[in-house]
Amino acid sequence: MSSIGKLVKQAARMQQQMEKVQSELAARTVESTSGGGAVKVAARCDGTLASIKIDPAAVNPADVSMLEDLVLSAVNQALTEAKEIANAEMGKLTSGLSVPGLM
């Protein structure tokens, strides 16, 4: 029975550590740009966007599709980097174990 008790305590401790890491990841941001800095995106490492900044010079009503591509590119780059950081941080916690549904 003591083995089960130790396992439960270890699981509770791991859950607390995971919550702490997730909270830290929500506060951590990465930034990506496209179009030579015309579009800047900041993403949180919890997978959400923090901000999108667009240089007014990049806004051309005659070429909206270019601006859309620049925004999409910067967003995808920022979210990819944020996910890589989150996976690395959670991987430290789980010691490389693959836990389904964790991230």
Image (cartoon, rainbow, N blue to C red):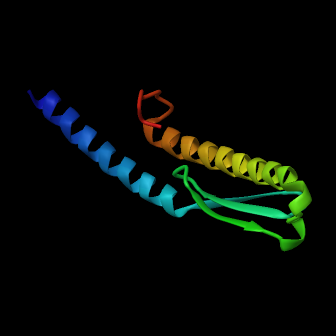
Q: Position of residue 23 (x, y in %)?
A: 42, 58
Q: Residue 87's quadrant in the figure?
A: top right
Residue 20 x/y as whole percent = 39, 56
Q: Is residue 74 above or below residue 28?
A: above
In the current view of this chain or complex, which residue is farthest to the front? 62
Residue occupying image coordinates x 33% and y 43%: 14
Camera-side residue of 53 and 45 = 53
Residue lying furthest left in this view?
Answer: 1
Q: Measured along the vertical axis of the image, is residue 34 above or below residue 54?
A: above
Q: What residue sits 51% from the left and 51% below the top?
A: 46
Q: Residue 100 appears in which quarter of the rendering? A: top left
Image coordinates for residue 21, horizontal then vertical, percent: 44, 53
Left or right, residue 76 beside residue 13: right
Taking the image as shown, residue 72 lies to the left or right of residue 61, namely: left
Residue 28 x %, y %: 56, 61
Kindly give the residue lying farthest to the bottom in the view shown.
56
On the rendered structure, is 22 left or right of 69? left
